[in-house]
Image: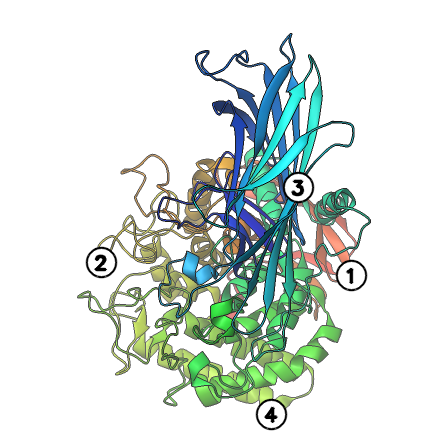
Amino acid sequence: MNDVVLKENDVFLVCGQEGTTIRNSQGQGHHGLYSRDTRFLSRLDWWLDPEVHIMLDKLSENGYEIFYWYTNTPPSDISSIPRESLWIERHQWVDATGLYEHVKIKNYALDPLEINVGYVVDADFVDMFEVRGFKDTPFQREVQVVTEKTACSYQYSARDGRITRTHVTLDAHPNHSVQVNVLPEKNGTTARRYQCKIRLLHQEQVELFLKVKIEIVPTVTNSVVISESCIAEKQTENDLDQYRWIRESYAQWFNQLPQVTGDLRFAAWYEQGLKDLRMLQSNLGYGTLLTAGVPWYAVPFGRDSLIAARMMLLANPELARGTLQTMAHFQGTQERPEKDEQPGKIVHEVRDGELSRLGILPFAPYYGSVDATPLFLNLAADYLRWTGDEELLEILLPHVHRALDWIERYGDRDGDGFLEYCREAEDGIANQGWKDSGDSIMYADGRLVEGPVALCEVQAYLYRAYLDWAQIFMSRGEKELATRLQNKASELQKSFRERFILSDGSIALALDGMKQPCAVISSNMGQVLQSLLLSKVEADRVAARITAEDMLTGFGIRTLSSKEKRYNPLSYHNGSVWPHDTCLVLQGLRNYSCRDEAVAVMENLLRAQDAFDLHRLPELFAGFGISESAKPVPYPVSCSPQAWAAATPVFVLEQIIGLRPNASRQQIALDPLLPDSIKELKIERIPLGHGHLSLYLKSLNKSTQYDVLQNTTGWEVLYEPMAREVMAH
């Protein structure tokens, strides 16, 4: 979507490229100011009389603010004001309390000018799902509006008693005499028009300040009560102090992260990813984590938040800590079929909109995800490997045991050792892997799968979880449990090879309820390489297949082969390219030391990020190959920024370094591999354990050399080929 997006904490703005929020003629549209899955501002039209103006430029260096610059361009027959005589700057930003705008207007005409300027605002308090197209809301909202001299307030009382308010004020700088009026729009709606009459002398400047404050009066209901967020909740004396505090927090965020230099293109991609990841941070009271993406998924998602946190381990392990603690808090505690919940299951998403709170939709919270639970176990093990944080391990251990118990009691529905899903909630999600659209799991003839469904990559996640936690429990002296998990891993590996590996060496997308394979070529089989589930020979076959022409587009890996019956490059999951998916396959290729294939995938991702504004990879893009389109074709409603897409450059950097820390051994294994288009990289202050590691990588004679510039971890650094563990296994 070609929108401007600003976000800080749980508040975000989605608007048009000129900074105005305009709904279409049917009163619909997705623009607005949002918080807690609720739209607090549905209209924000900035206007200038004479109305003809042009935007000269805009700049958004940080995710919470943007600057716009305009001048006036009225034809002489409708205005006596000379063209290009006004200079207008609009500075918008959001914080945890709402939206703010500082406007400067300066007169460069030789004579005094009289102009009218202002806004039209409105609020509808609709649920995000209604914005997305849900049409079965069984009630009409009644929004009250109260108008004062230079302000108006909107209020809505939800069916569960929660009160939401939007307060809009417009003031001029005290040094300027500006008349501000608030008038009802003539169409009889709740919209209000703010009008400022301004007289400017030659070289005189006037300043206006718009405030849109949101307010929520919480209630005690059966829904999840989300705590006040903590990313930017510092109490300050005024709004400008809050703005300065957010700016300082951005600087602190960047200062604590690894710095990357040596290749301007990669550094720009990496830095934009970090900016977007700062924007997407939130906190439900249990530590900082990443929301999935703006605008549709600006809430915690089990799968998305866990994968994005794993991708960010190289840069900021604290995100993994906050994510794990949040997921542990929302871990399932009871059997509730209407929410697809069982004890020990990790949450899929945590919504707080009215429709979810009332139970009209099942998402406050919702547990319809088969992979979030093994991903929780995998992230916890990886976090421990990178940090050695035994304190968090002790906190998480009860939740780890519950997750393992869920896998055995509920996840494996028929006792065959595979992790399967089958929707129980009537309004829940049918397909409960990462490809969760309704048509994403199919047979070779195009028919949709009949469940329960066992996805190939989910078995790989599970296999990893068994092995990692067998090792952790063995180190803690819990030999019986460790042995049981090791045996489960061995049994799963044997069953997987018998059931999932097809005659041509590729891997079935899934098994259906009768254990028949969905024998289609998909990116899911590439994610299987993330584990050590396959032998080196088996992995090499998968690597060759996943990077064949029908899968590798020149910009990334298709979700579904172009040879398959349901292939559609413009679909959500059946032929599009998801950057994070491609990146997870890249990790698998590196795990098995498939170096040529890994380099090809890296170059695909580098070529893709070149094509997008600000080097910002979106959630997904169309799966047309480079022979069909010279650059990636956008997907029309893709989230951007989106957490795991924003984390892609960080995870690519991890694969370039071939970094595998092991806190228990106090070792750091490296196997660097620069893609052909990057000749050198300098990476400073990678956080590991209680210290940092700095490296210099350089391409020399078709190999990658490395120097350790600094190592304050106290751990040993050694070169270790990526496939060594596979060979040993």
- Where is residue 126? Give x, y as percent: 48, 59
Could you say which is closer to the camera, residue 431 or residue 183? 183
- Where is residue 496? Give x, y as percent: 36, 77
Could you say which is closer to the camera, residue 48 or residue 689? 48
Residue under circle 1?
Answer: 690
Lower position in the chain sequence, tag 2 or tag 1: 2
Residue 720 versus residue 53 in the image, above or below = below
Number of the front mark, 4 or 3: 3
Lower position in the chain sequence, tag 2 or tag 3: 3
- Where is residue 59? Give x, y as percent: 59, 32
Label 2–label 3 contact, CB within 8 A: no
Q: Amino acid at mark 3?
A: Thr
For the residues labelled 4 and 2, the Cα–Cα distance comes to: 46 Å
Label ID, residue 564: 2
Q: Amino acid at mark 1?
A: His
Label ID, residue 480: 4
For numbered disc 1, what is the local secondary structure? Answer: loop
Q: State the image quarter where residue 670 is shown.
A: bottom right
- Residue pushed farthest bottom? 480
Residue under circle 3?
Answer: 150
Residue at (56% x, 72% y) in the render: 376
For the residues labelled 1 and 3, the Cα–Cα distance comes to: 54 Å
For numbered disc 4, what is the local secondary structure? Answer: helix
Q: Residues within 10 Å of mark 1 (few under 14, many from 20)?
A: few
Lower position in the chain sequence, tag 4 or tag 3: 3
Q: Can I make out residue 110 in this image?
A: yes
